[in-house]
Amino acid sequence: MKNSAADLHAGIRLTGKWHNGNYPLIRKLGSGAIGTVYLTKRNGVDAALKISDKRTSMTMEMNVLQSLKKVRGHFLGPCLFDTDDYVSPSGQLYTFYVMEYIQGSRLDTYIKARGVEWLPVLLLSLLEDLDYLHQAGWVFGDLKLDNLVVSENPVRLRWVDVGGTTQLGRSIKEYTEFYDRGHWGMGSRKAEPTYDLFALAMTALEIMNGGRFPKGDTPKSTIRKALSRAEKLRPILEKALSGKYTTATAMKQDLVKHLMKNKAPASAATPSRVAKSNRRKAGLGECVVLSFYGIACYVLYLLQ
Amino acid sequence: MKPSTLKQILLITDGCSNRGEDPAAVAALANAQHITVNVIGILEEGHTEHSLSLDEVENIAKAGGGVSQLIYKQALTETVQMVTKQAMTQTIEGVVNRELKQILGPGNTLDDLPPEKRGDVLEVVEEISETANLEVLILVDTSASMHHKLPVVKEALIDLSISMNARLGNNKFAILGFPGKRDPAVKVMEWTERLENVSSVFPKLATGGVTPTGPALREAIHEFSRQSLPKRTDGITEYEEFGS
């Protein structure tokens, strides 16, 4: 990005060229291959503003967000408020959009703090969203840890970046090697529901293996090794990785079955967790109760 | 829209041209014939002063209407598919922009449309780049210094085939290596829809010699006309072509 460091930084205000919206850049929230996201205010409420000089990619992202808006009655990705251009004092043209600010923690941080039993529960909510997305004719594409946020009230796993979202049947627009089945020699890069489920299973493996792992010379045995750390989730993840779930709902149903079997899901006081939650020992009991409650609620909700 | 064919040359090199005509001039010649030239320059690990000049790589791609990228070899895989896709979008956008100017008068490019309208136009661009037929001639530098990089090039090309095979449009690939024993470049793989067959041809690649990038690019252009020669003789072009 030319001049972007000088043009764009927290503290400035920018005004849209077409719709005259005025937005303060309060704080940088993150930056990726395509642009930088800032915290801003819209009508006094926190919002996220993504800005970049990569006009084409930005416009395609807006297209996706616009179409997701039309998916009736269900939250799929952040809500889009405004799209506009910004001409900096130096004359450089930028494109930006303002969207809902989804506050929450990273999935791996959340799991570390609250226990691995939360992983399948959180996956349920995401699988539900994925199913809506697939039914609407889209595949998320670039599903990965960095693109997921655990939002509170209600606790829900949500995606935040739709840069890879691709129409069903086309070629995946954007992907990250570790989560890409093509990279592992385990499938094509065609946008199909199975593509997302593979990436989701890799995300789970990443969390349970404490990080990403290299492909190695024999990718399949690398995956097998990683699966051995998935314990009870292993059969489900294995099915997802080999493309045996053709819909997100099928994977969700297996997860529900698995959760129902676990009468005592919270092996509450595993040593590692006690060590990690030392500073908030008081909260531990509460946490266990909450997780029990959370799982119970979910299962009840799903069985309705 | 009629099915269209996009033609690209993908030059993968790690050194400056040191023999023959200016490669940028040949790239311009390619561009004039509706062939886009993309360049990927592979940097030598740990070398502060590398043999590869950023200027040359940029100049060839600029003259050839394409995209350039200087990278270390670990990044080759993601770069190859990104450069190919980006160049397709860029070519199609170029055509759309010219059409817009023709319809709406000068000063009407994509930048002069508000984002909502631009979105509609780019949806069409995306649609075309997904469905267009693509012909890529891969021109691989096989001079001595490339020897230990060729396995990575092979991996990257297999990965490119995974990405391209997922498209709705058809693909065709051919590979030239340069320098050849007598000629500036030698054909390593015939035009094929299956780039993944590249594994069988790579062991045969001999490395060594000088870097005649300009003459090799000229060979690459010829390769396109040779391929489409049968079509030209019956006076009908099968596809609508994208020019720039």
Image (tube, coloured by chain):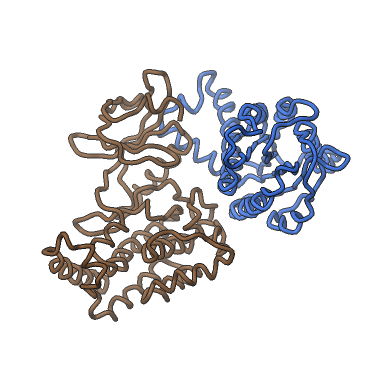
User: Residue A26's quadrant in the figure?
Assistant: top left
Q: Is residue A1 left or right of residue A97?
A: right
Residue drawn 39% across and 65% down? A209
Q: Quadrant of the C terminus of chain A?
A: bottom left
User: Residue A152's quadrant in the figure?
Assistant: bottom left
User: Residue A240's quadrant in the figure?
Assistant: bottom left
- Please, is residue B215 above or below residue B141 in the view? above
Looking at the image, which is closer to me, A148 or A207?
Answer: A207
The x and y percentages for residue A178 are 48, 57
- Please, is residue B190 above or below residue A286 in the view? above
Chain in blue (letter): B
The x and y percentages for residue A141 are 46, 54
Q: Is residue B44 left or right of residue A206?
A: right
Looking at the image, which is closer to me, A216 or A286?
Answer: A216
Looking at the image, which is closer to me, B50 or A4?
Answer: B50
Question: Count of labels shown?
Answer: 0
Chain A colour in the picture: brown
Is residue B139 visible in the rendered structure shown here? no
Is residue A234 visible in the rendered structure shown here? yes
Residue drawn 30% across and 54% down? A106
- Please, is residue B17 above or below residue A256 in the view? above
Residue drawn 23% across and 62% down? A276
Looking at the image, which is closer to me, B238 or B159?
Answer: B159
The x and y percentages for residue B117 are 43, 33
Q: Quadrant of the N terminus of chain A?
A: top left
Judged from this view, the residue extending furthest toward the right is: B182
The x and y percentages for residue B107 are 51, 19
